[in-house]
Amino acid sequence: MKKSIHCVLALLLTFTPWLAQAALNVVTSTEDIAALTLAIGGDAVKVKPLTRGTADPHFAQAKPSMIREVYQADLLVVVGAELEVGWMPALLQSARNDKVQPGNPGYLDLSTAVTLLDKPSGAVTRDMGDVHAAGNPHYWLDPNNGVLMARGIAQRLAQLDSAHAKDFERALASFEQQAQVKIATWKTALAPLAGKAVMSYHTSFVYLANAFGFRIAAQVEPKPGISPSAAYLTQLIARIKEQQIGVLIMEPYYEQRSAKYLSEHTGVRVAVLPQSVGATEQIKTYFDLFDAIVAALKNTGAV
Ligand SMILES: [Zn+2]
């Protein structure tokens, strides 16, 4: 009897290192976070994004497949700052996985890793449109924030899988090094935009503007999440002329009629920019995203 217990113990000890090496199941709200997690986690993680980069991340439907992913997750990583407020709470409730509930180590809100812009000074009311009390949630569009996000991910992965902590550290160092080189290249490419007034469709590009030194002078949406009326477009035509706005940047998932109309009446160049990893098939990594943004701005003659 004693002998067999020893045998079982010996077996367990033999297999424990193998058990510790089982890949962590990481579920992310967006493909951007999935790409960052894969860059840091490598073979030690299995990553599944809940939404596609081709879709508007403000909206998603909690499908049964998503509930299953969250149920099986060891770690759930979200953009936070209320970006997923329309669908994540219901999903978390249906998935019934304690590990990934807010407040537990299996839940990581990356908005806590960065400094959010556009924090409303007063109370937030519904008639302000899609305005978030915590600040603007589109922060992944500043590559400097991408570095902070990668750090947050590396830290949490190390906490959940200490056996691979050194690997995560190494991957993070290499990511940061690459980011430095890349950011310098993108800055050079976008230098012609520095100091310029640019219009955006939604409030999503303030971080990109901040990173590369241009200014979002106006938005096509009168309020975030609200599309413009004909009367409002007429006002915008005047503003584009007054402020000499040369470029209008927007995500592929918004209606393009308003932008076309503004362009016809003012000559403003419309640049449809990918906003996320996965927005096109070619954009597979976080660095690919900014390469594609720069390419899109070049193609429209904005830089
Ligand atoms: Zn938004």
Image (cartoon, grey):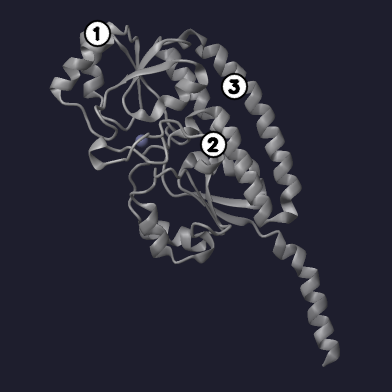
Taking 187 as reference, is 59 left or right? Answer: left
Residue at mark 1: C-beta within 8 A of ligand 1: no
* Image quadrant assignment for residue 226: top left
Residue at mark 3: C-beta within 8 A of ligand 1: no
Q: Which kind of residue does numbered mark 1 sit on?
A: Thr
Tell me which numbered mark, 2 or 3, is placed earlier along the sequence. Answer: 2
Q: Which kind of residue does numbered mark 2 sit on?
A: Val
Name the disc covering residue 266, or none: 1
Please name the residue shown 39% across and 47% down the image: 84
Q: Which residue in the protein does label 2 denote?
A: 114
Q: Where residue 74 sits: x, y (%)?
A: 57, 59
Q: Which residue in the protein does label 3 denote?
A: 183
Secondary element under disc 1, as helix, strand or loop, is helix
Name the disc covering residue 55, or none: none
* Of residues 99 and 284, the one drawn nearer to the viewer in this rendering: 99
Secondary element under disc 3, as helix, strand or loop, is helix
